[in-house]
Image (cartoon, rainbow, N blue to C red):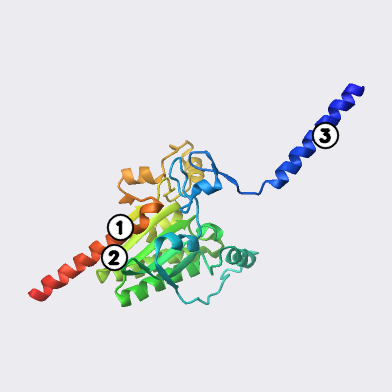
């Protein structure tokens, strides 16, 4: 009996030590890559929050992306819209919480930036704002971005990250697919460049509209790109799909995107694209004037 009590006391002391030790370890020190399942010390993600084993780019806020992509940024003027057009229960509270977490008024940050010597219209979707879902304000902000860029004769860069249309806004959300597409068409008719960069995840109505309507479509390594999600596809088809079916690498192989670009290479790569486009415009203008 004495031996039993001694073992029990040792066990209690060990459990107490483990609990105290866990309380002293801050949350977030280690993260698991959702692609390769490797455990990563948070500092090893580096500036670009990229898995050192498979190059997967961890989901990153819109404002954080500015630090490695642009030299200067001027945000667009805030919008005033009906935040809850269908009076969806508790939706207003969810919006306010997302605004507090991200510091954004909706799921996309828009404005005008310089990347090297180039002036561009820029939109960055934030996956931390209700999973980057597309609401009426999202569509309005993108539409106005393209409209102003068309007037100013500027190229536009959109960085997408979205679970698709926002169900709490119903048809008002789905309407943004057509509205943004019309603004993109008017921008294209002026011979202006549009580059999209698809990040993890880019799905649903965003994929079916502005994300894939660009002149040049880029993507990050291992990003999920598709329309319906894996669970929806498998439940509809009653069979499992390949694990990499919607990975950017598979999508590239099937010709739906033009290039996969890691985060460290995005700024120089996009700068080069902008320079080539400006050079082409300059040559075309010179040729036309000489006639």
Return the residue at label 1: 216
Q: Residues within 10 Å of mark 2 (few under 14, many from 20)?
A: many
Q: Is residue 243 above or below residue 262?
A: above
Residue at the spot 46% in from the left edge and 49% down from the top edge: 57
Residue positioned 45% across, 62% down in the render: 67
Label placed on residue 193: 2
Q: Quadrant of the N terminus?
A: top right
Q: Residues within 10 Å of mark 1 (few under 14, many from 20)?
A: some
Q: Describe the element under mark 2 as helix, strand or loop.
A: loop
Residue 154, compared with residue 162, is above or below; it is below
| On screen, residue 147 above or below 267 | below
* Residue 163 tag number: none
* Res 257 visible: no
Tag in front: 3 or 2: 3
Per the image, label 3 sits on a secondary structure element best described as helix
Q: Give left or right: position of 12 versus 2.
A: left
Query: Dividing the image into 4 quarters, which one contains the C terminus?
Result: bottom left
Q: Secondary structure at mark 1?
A: strand
Q: Residue 144: percent from the left, percent from the top?
A: 41, 73
Seen at 50% across and 65% down, the residue is 135
């Amino acid at each position: 009996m004495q031996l039993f009590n001694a073992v029990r006391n040792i066990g209690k002391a060990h459990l107490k030590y483990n609990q105290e030790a866990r309380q002293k370890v801050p949350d977030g020190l280690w993260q698991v890559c959702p692609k390769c399942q490797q455990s990563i010390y948070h500092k090893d993600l580096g500036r670009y929050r990229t898995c050192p084993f498979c190059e997967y780019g961890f989901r990153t806020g819109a404002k954080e992306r500015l630090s490695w992509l642009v030299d200067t940024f001027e945000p667009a003027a805030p919008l005033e819209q009906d935040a809850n057009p269908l009076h969806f229960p508790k939706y207003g509270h969810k919006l306010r919480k997302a605004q507090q977490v991200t510091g954004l008024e909706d799921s996309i940050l828009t404005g005008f930036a310089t990347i090297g010597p180039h002036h561009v219209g820029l939109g960055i979707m934030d996956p931390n704002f209700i999973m980057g879902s597309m609401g009426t304000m999202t569509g309005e902000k993108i539409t106005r971005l393209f409209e102003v860029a068309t007037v100013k004769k500027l190229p536009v860069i959109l960085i997408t990250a979205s679970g698709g249309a926002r169900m709490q806004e119903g048809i008002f959300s789905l309407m943004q697919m057509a509205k943004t597409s019309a603004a993109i068409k008017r921008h294209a008719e002026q011979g202006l460049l549009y580059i999209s960069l698809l990040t993890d995840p880019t799905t649903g109505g965003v994929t079916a509209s502005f994300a894939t309507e660009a002149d040049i479509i880029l993507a990050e390594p291992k990003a999920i790109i598709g329309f319906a999600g894996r669970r929806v596809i498998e439940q509809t088809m009653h069979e499992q799909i390949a694990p990499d079916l919607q990975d950017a690498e598979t999508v590239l192989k099937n010709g739906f995107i033009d290039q996969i670009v890691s985060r460290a290479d995005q700024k120089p790569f996009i700068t080069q694209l902008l320079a080539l486009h400006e050079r082409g415009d300059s040559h075309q203008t010179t040729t036309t004037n000489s006639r």
